[in-house]
Amino acid sequence: MEQDKKSGNNGYELRKAAGLYWLLDLRQGGEHYKPPLAMNEMGAEIFKYRQFGDSEEEIIRKTGNTYDADVETIKRDVTSFLKKLREYETE
């Protein structure tokens, strides 16, 4: 199984396995298990940019430079995924 670990200082770890990226909450313990959040390569890049402290605007710009899509699509996808990350982190 292929693995790629990237750790931030917020208690989450990003790993690659079975062709997907998985965000693990390392802060949880015992009773309430929170399953990992699965994401594709673009989601993993957005997560990493956020870990480095990039603003939403910077993430949109960097993602737009990487992927061949119109600006509105990139903006919508990035905004939607950042919302999903915030929800996951507050569960």
Image (cartoon, rainbow, N blue to C red):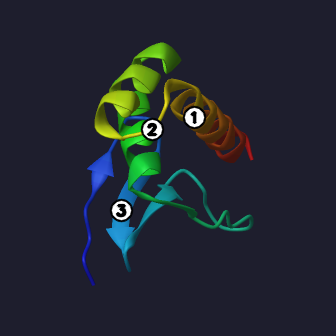
> What percent of the width, then of the height, locates residue 60?
46, 24
Say which quarter of the image contains residue 8. top left
* Drawn side of residue 16 relative to residue 50, left or right: left
> What percent of the width, then of the height, locates residue 35?
63, 67
Callout 2 amino acid:
Ala
> What percent of the width, then of the height, locates residue 50?
43, 29
Give the SS element for disc 3.
strand
Give the SS element for disc 1.
helix
* Drawn side of residue 44 relative to residue 2, left or right: right
Residue 15: mark in rendering: 3
Of callouts 1 and 3, which one flags the residue occurring earlier in the amino acid sequence? 3
Which residue is at a point 60% across and 41% down the rendered structure image? 81
Give the SS element for disc 2.
loop
Mark 1, other Cα within 10 Å: few <14 / some 14–19 / many ≥20: few
Residue 69: mark in rendering: 2
Callout 3 amino acid:
Arg
In this rendering, which labeled residue sits more in front, label 2 or label 3? 2
Q: Nearer the viewer, residue 26 or 2?
A: 2
Residue 13 in the image: above or below residue 31 = above
Q: Which residue is mark 1?
A: 73
In this rendering, which labeled residue sits more in front, label 1 or label 3? 1
Callout 1 amino acid:
Thr
Question: Which quadrant holds the N terminus?
Answer: bottom left
